Amino acid sequence: MTHDATVASDLEIVMDRVVDAPRELVWEAWTQIEHIERWWGRDGLTTTTLEFEMRPGGVWRSVMHAPDGVDYKIRIVFREVTPPDRLTYVHDDEGAGQVPEFPTTVTFEDVDGKTRVTMRSEFASKAERDRVWEEGAKEGGPQMLARMAEHVAHMARR
């Protein structure tokens, strides 16, 4: 499996991983809350969902709980849900000031029976991009995608 997280431009962060599973299974892991809660976030975090509706205009509100007791609010508003190819959403923290609002596009590409997952997040400024990169995406992004791939492997064995 390959994985990468890069600052692709002054305004973008791109994360990429090839998962050893068919696209439909990876899509399921990304779009059903009982799966998302098991892998979302960097190592050590757990996620509690407050609201979830996977559709254009739908919202996923959750709280990520860190081992040190800090909670991170998340709100994702889905813009596009195109099975099993593409998700587009806007990510923010409901005004808590922990992260800026930013749109993300996730694509799912079939690669000889495996799935390339690519997350592309865009920022209003280089400073916002740098903040998200340094405060979580640089290490947390690859960790989250590794957790997702591990969960998908578990799903494939069921």
Image: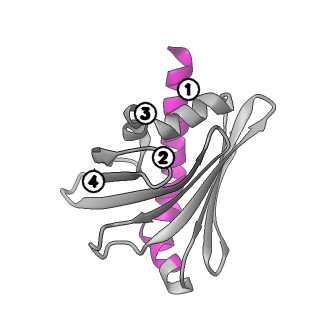
Measured in 3D between alpha carbons, the distance from the residue under mark 1 to the one under mark 2, in whole angstroms, is 26 Å
Task: Classify the position of the N terminus by image quarter.
Answer: top right
From the viewer's side, name the closer residue of 62 and 19: 62
Q: Nearer the viewer, residue 12 or 6?
A: 12
Tag 3: amino acid: His
The span from disc 3 to disc 2 (Cα, nearest Å) is 17 Å
Which of pointers 3 and 2 lies earlier in the amino acid sequence? Answer: 3
Q: Position of residue 130 (x, y in %)?
A: 51, 78
Residue 47 showing in the rendered view? no
Magenta stretch, residue numbers: 129-158
Mark 3 neighbour density, 10 Å: few (under 14) some (14–19) many (20 or more): some
Residue that appears at 76% across and 28% down: 113
Residue furthest out toward the top: 158
Residue 111 x %, y % = 79, 37
Residue 147 percent coordinates (x, y): 48, 40
Residue at left 61%, top 78%? 11
How far apart marks 4 and 3 lie (CA) works out to: 16 Å
Q: Earlier in the sequence, mark 1 or mark 3?
A: 3
Please determine whether, in this image, residue 20 is positioned above or below residue 134. Answer: above
Considering the numbered disc 3 on the image, is that residue within a helix, a strand or a loop? Answer: helix
73 vs 51, nearest the viewer? 51
Q: Amino acid at mark 1?
A: Ala
Element class at badge 1:
helix
Circle 4: residue type = Val
* Contact between labelled residues 3 and 4, with CB atoms less than 8 Å apart: no
Q: Nearer the viewer, mark 3 or mark 2?
A: 2
Looking at the rendered structure, the number of numbered marks drawn on it comes to: 4
The circle on residue 63 is 4
The residue that mark 3 highlights is 35
Q: Nearer the viewer, mark 2 or mark 4?
A: 2
Q: Tags 1 and 3 in contact by the CB under 8 Å rule? A: no
